[in-house]
Amino acid sequence: MNTSIPAGPRRILHVPRRFVEHEWGGTESVLANLLAAQRGLGWEPEIHTSLALSTVRRETWRGIEVRRYPYVYPFFGLNAAQKAAMDKKGGNLMSWSLLWALWRRPDVRLLHAHVLKRPGGIVRTAARWRGLPYVVTLHGGIFDVPKAELASLTEAQEGKFEWGKFAGALLGSRRVLDDAGAVICVGRVEAEKARKALPHDRVHHIGNGVDCAFFSQGDGAAFRAKHGLPANARVMLCVSRFDPQKDQLAVVEAFDAQAARHPDLHLVLAGPATLADYVAKIDARIAASPYASRVRRLASLAPGSAELAGAFQAAEVFMIASRHEPFGIVALEAWSAGLCVVASTAGGLADLVRDGETGFSFAPGDAAGAAAALGRALGERELAKCCAAAGRARATGEFAWSRIAEQTEAAYQAAEAWWAVSRAK
């Protein structure tokens, strides 16, 4: 693969559904790190997205140009709460100004969509108008999603008349994956299903990466002091958006099951809230615990912040109990910090966390199994240390962002080669 910069346009337009720091999630983390690595290769990546959850139309974020555009949800009868819920999760928005900007932006090499439906159709249409290839990354939202998760994505629009179907048809929203020069899947299972479902062979499996250096540093003592955690506490950490998909209730249950046996055990939960009702359930469950004084539930920790790095350095065990997880980037972050990872076997986590080798695992939704896996991580300390070391070796050896950027570049070059051949026919 050639990663040198050839003559020609260097600008790459990345299009996620939204990009906001206070609602940071896996897609935002991937974009921030991938684009930084692309800049290191000499490209000029930009983010073009909607104004969902933001009022800032244009900014430079860590050296990356970010442009946001007005949008609508084309449904009759949406109230403010339903619109806010769609902003938070899964909203199928429409933005004519985004389409115009993608069409008019000069000196563009290719377009890279990180979303499907109408926004993906916007990318497809702009690319076709310009005569450029486009690439799509599936961050886990089509071929490998449980029915319950799909239902939660469309709950806010149920019973509403969708007047935007014509726009979707005009944009070719249902052909976004068929016409893409490359389809990148972050999860192996999703990649396998995509290869079977799509009428072409342009599917690439490229996992996410991690900034190992960032998570290997941090002031754990300062984090403990700030949040009232004893210096000798054994801290279990869960950093993830609060959503039923992530099943933080199972994390609290597992903590409760082990707290009596380990009186020095403390739990820290942190992340943005997708659903306020779910956060209320978590708070009620914590309040009902006899060990509530040993639990801290925090809001989102700013990406790249000293407090985020400190949280990882303050912990001994990281737990994620997802019911659906396309990849599981937080496992890489925990390994980078030297933590033992306890994880469900949902999606990509099953590939990352191998029981007794790189961590301890349990079936999604298995409360007893989760408690048992946590018990092993706390009780079998030498094995836990070995698992943490093996995980860190995987994180540093397989998932450096420079490597992910090179794999993405190979997908870009394949997309460009296919596009050139298809246009010549």
Image (tube, rainbow, N blue to C red):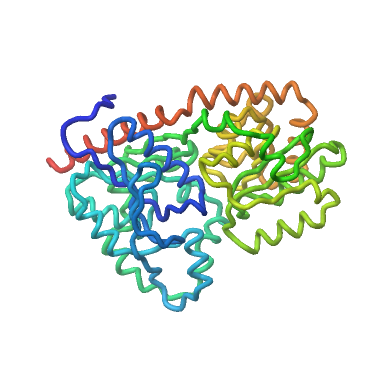
| Rendering coords of residue 389 (x, y %) | 63, 22
- Where on the picture, by quarter, is residue 172? bottom left
Using residue 301 as the reference point, say whether residue 1 is left or right of it. Answer: left
Using residue 220 as the reference point, say whether residue 211 is left or right of it. Answer: left
Q: Nearer the viewer, residue 11 or 244?
A: 11
Using residue 29 as the reference point, say whether residue 201 is left or right of it. Answer: left
Q: How many marks?
A: 0
| Rendering coords of residue 324 (x, y %) | 58, 47
> Eyeballing the image, is 60 above or below 161?
above
Q: Nearer the viewer, residue 124 or 399?
A: 399
Residue at 33% of width from left, 52% of height from top? Answer: 48
Using residue 152 as the reference point, say whether residue 365 is left or right of it. Answer: right
Residue with the most extreme bottom position? 77
Residue with the most extreme left position? 424
| Rendering coords of residue 270 (x, y %) | 63, 48
| Rendering coords of residue 141 (x, y %) | 47, 50
Residue at 29% of width from left, 59% of height from top? Answer: 98
Considering the image in quadrants, where does the N terminus appear? top left
> Eyeballing the image, is 315 above or below 137?
above
Considering the image in quadrants, where does the C terminus appear? top left
- Where on the picture, by quarter, is residue 340? top right
> Eyeballing the image, is 400 above or below 366?
above
Q: Nearer the viewer, residue 327 or 48?
A: 48
Residue at 46% of width from left, 46% of height from top? Answer: 27
Residue at 79% of width from left, 33% of height from top? Answer: 232
